[in-house]
Image (cartoon, helix red, strand yellow):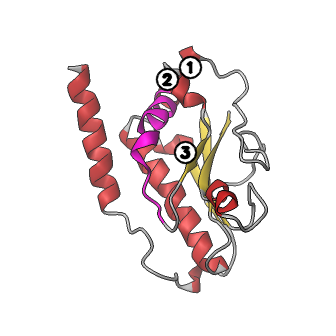
Amino acid sequence: MNMHKTALIISLAAFALAGCPSSGGPLDSDTGGSVIDDTSGSDGSGTSGVDGSTIRSGGFTDSDAGDTTADSLIIYFEYDKSEVSAQYVDILAGHARRLAADSTQRLRLEGHADERGSREYNIGLGERRAQAVRRLLLIQGASAAQISTVSYGEERPAAFGSTESDYEKNRRVEMSYRR
């Protein structure tokens, strides 16, 4: 039964992501050139270092999410893509379990892009990435009221530089917990 439930969740996630546009070209400037943010305030926790290393959430143990895969607070993306890679499905399932187990938990999803592309396009791409992660968390049992998203586009790089390695570290969604 548990195996069937997992297969169903993965199938639903794939189905949901199949309808998501990956790039589609430049966005209209309806963002006004500013950061898209559907929440206010941030405690700054759950970020990555300049070298791209993951900073762990304080006090988050295996029992909080059921496995250690939920310790990861960063989801990385391919160039100009907003689809969540299959390698992150288990990690997001752990985060969804954590949220479902504690309704006081709140999760902020921060979408980022590398410096290639216009500022407006990268804001939109960061938002699409954050929304893709949000959809997977919702499919896996998290509550919509627990999750907020923001897009910083290229404005907050994890790595400064113009190498492919730097770009890879900047194409991400960071997850930040708060109560």
Q: Which amino acid type is shown beneath numbered disc 3?
A: Ile
Which residue occupies 77% across, 65% down? 161
Indicate yes or no whether the magenta region holds residue 106: no
The residue pinned by badge 3 equals 147
- Residue 2 located left or right of residue 82: left
- Place residue 23 in its image quadrant: bottom left
Q: CA distance from mark 1 to mark 2?
A: 8 Å
Residue 93 part of the magenta segment: yes
Identify the amino acid type marked 1: Asp
Highlighted range, magenta: 81-97
Q: Please, is residue 5 above or below residue 137 in the view?
A: above
Image quarter in which the N terminus is found: top left
Counting residues from the N terminus, which is met first, the one under dot 1 or under dot 3?
1
Viewer-proximal residue among 30 and 26: 26
Callouts 1 and 2 close, C-beta under 8 Å: yes
Q: Quadrant of residue 154?
A: bottom right
Q: Secondary structure at mark 1?
A: helix
Q: Which residue is mark 2?
A: 101
The answer for how far apart the CA atoms under marks 1 and 3 are is 17 Å
Question: Quick check: can you spot residue 104?
Answer: no
Which residue is identified by label 1? 64
Q: Residue at x 58, y 54 (%)?
A: 149
